[in-house]
Image: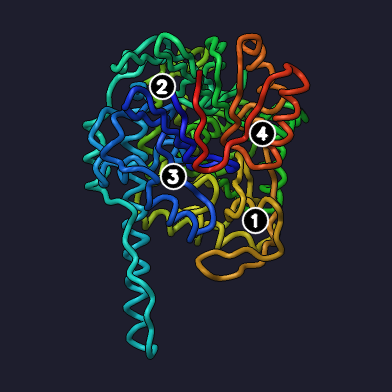
Amino acid sequence: MEIHFWGATRTVTGSMHEIQHEGKSLLLDCGLFQGRRAEAKERNCCFPFEPSKIDQVVLSHAHIDHSGNLPNLVKQGFSGPIHATEATQDLCRAMLADSAHIQEMDAEFLMRRRRSRKRVLDNYDEPVVEPLYTTADAEKTFPLFAPLPMRGLQELGNGLRVETVEAGHMLGSVCMRLTDGKTRLGFSGDIGRANLPIIRDPQQMLPCEYLIMESTYGDRLHQDDGSVLDKLADIVNRTAARGGKIVVPSFAVGRTQQLVLLMNQLMMAKRIPNIPIFVDSPLAVNVTGTFRKYSNLFDDETAKMLAEDADGDVFGFSRLKYIRDVADSKALNDLHGPFLVISASGMCEAGRVLHHLKNSIADPRNTVLITGFQAGNTLGRKILDKWPEVPIFGEMIRLRAEVAKINELSGHADQRELLEWLKPIAPGLKKVFLVHGEPSAQEAFKKAVEATYGLEVVIPSHGDVQGLD
């Protein structure tokens, strides 16, 4: 068995690891790389292998940095099964279709701009822009989905099998162990945290000799400054008192549903003013329907809320409005505060949230609320780092709004939680490969693992190959 590290190496996004075994190739995840535009385009367009020679894919979960390049893989010749849990399959259907639509719309916008500039500028020669993949490419991907249990075993053929446990990171997410009967290789995917809203806690990982492990928050501890409800209520109350808007860039899958649930609780308890709340993301609207479908995967607290809710719906309440139409989305820019809008994307790289930020961040009455990890070079990171001016649609805009952050909703375990997750399987491990982390986080976590468990820890680079005994 041999690992080829192709994605999420010394960076957070673009998860993709090729496992070669007895002449066959399997991909663990096939995610989009996000970051600087030129680098992202090159990394996402050009696979470092022949897609038609990949025999199958196994997905840890549906987030775009783990699943988002599947349609391009299919477009370039892949035709094998894509193993994913039922919830992950349903989420991917919505997310990959949305990703394709956004790329088509972005390409159309850039082509209109190209034609306009070419008419008025001599010797103008901006290259033609095409989407990475289209809606049709995404639709060709969906029939390839194949079973993967949330907790259990799936035969992959060629002497390989995969066993899974719940990762506690998002709906449908799993950690997994590949084995050929001799070698056992673990893949953490993304490791969640205990006591997150909606989803169940991570299960104990299965024993293995080798482990590919995420390290997103390997250099930090989540601050416990009080309950997330207290912090959220404080941010809403002080912004509303200023007459301001709260713009929440949010991942459409998981984070949006958690925020809606918390806002529902605060409204019911009358801890915040009776302000309008909008979810402005067609994808989030579709995905919320998927969450309702898989209520059997909810944690005990959310299941209890669901049972006690008169309408049987914890994702809907009187002051909440889900927005699909573009016209309704644009109308929010003319609406005076106070109100709260949750909109994708979570790292502010695309989607309707860009329009809300463009129309809000110059006003000191408003608040931008960050609730998740912001990768380097993204607009979300620049806002979180409080740049005096940030680029939106090619225009530098003064950042005067308050920037607030809530860490408690992070779907990634921190250093202490990662070490606890590793503890039960550490005695049997020969080697740990750290992926899905920025270099500083990985170096810090490498030292922590070596000091705590005395294990050999490797931080692979793009293209590294590792043979397993």
Q: What separation in Å lies between label 1 and label 2 (alpha carbons)? A: 41 Å
Looking at the image, tell me whether mark 3 or mark 4 is earlier in sequence order. 3
Percent position of residue 108, x then y = 31, 64
Assign a secondary structure to mark 2: loop
The residue labelled by disc 4 is 217
Question: What's under tag 1, amino acid-wise?
Answer: Lys
The residue labelled by disc 3 is 32
| On-image quarter of the N terminus | top left
| The image quarter in which residue 164 lies | top left
Looking at the image, tell me whether mark 4 or mark 1 is earlier in sequence order. 4
Residue 263 appears in the rendering: yes
Looking at the image, tell me whether mark 1 or mark 2 is earlier in sequence order. 2
The residue labelled by disc 1 is 382
| The image quarter in which residue 443 lies | top right
Question: What's under tag 2, amino acid-wise?
Answer: Asp
Looking at the image, tell me whether mark 2 or mark 4 is earlier in sequence order. 4
Residue 351 appears in the rendering: no
The answer to which of 200 and 363 lies nearer the viewer is 200
When the figure is inspected, residue 323 is found, relative to residue 261, above or below; the finding is below
The answer to which of 193 and 303 lies nearer the viewer is 193
Question: What's under tag 3, amino acid-wise?
Answer: Leu
Q: Nearer the viewer, mark 4 or mark 1?
A: 4
Looking at the image, tell me whether mark 3 or mark 2 is earlier in sequence order. 3
Assign a secondary structure to mark 4: loop
Q: Residue at x 49, y 57 (%)?
A: 39
The residue labelled by disc 2 is 311
| Left or right for 135, reference 217 | left
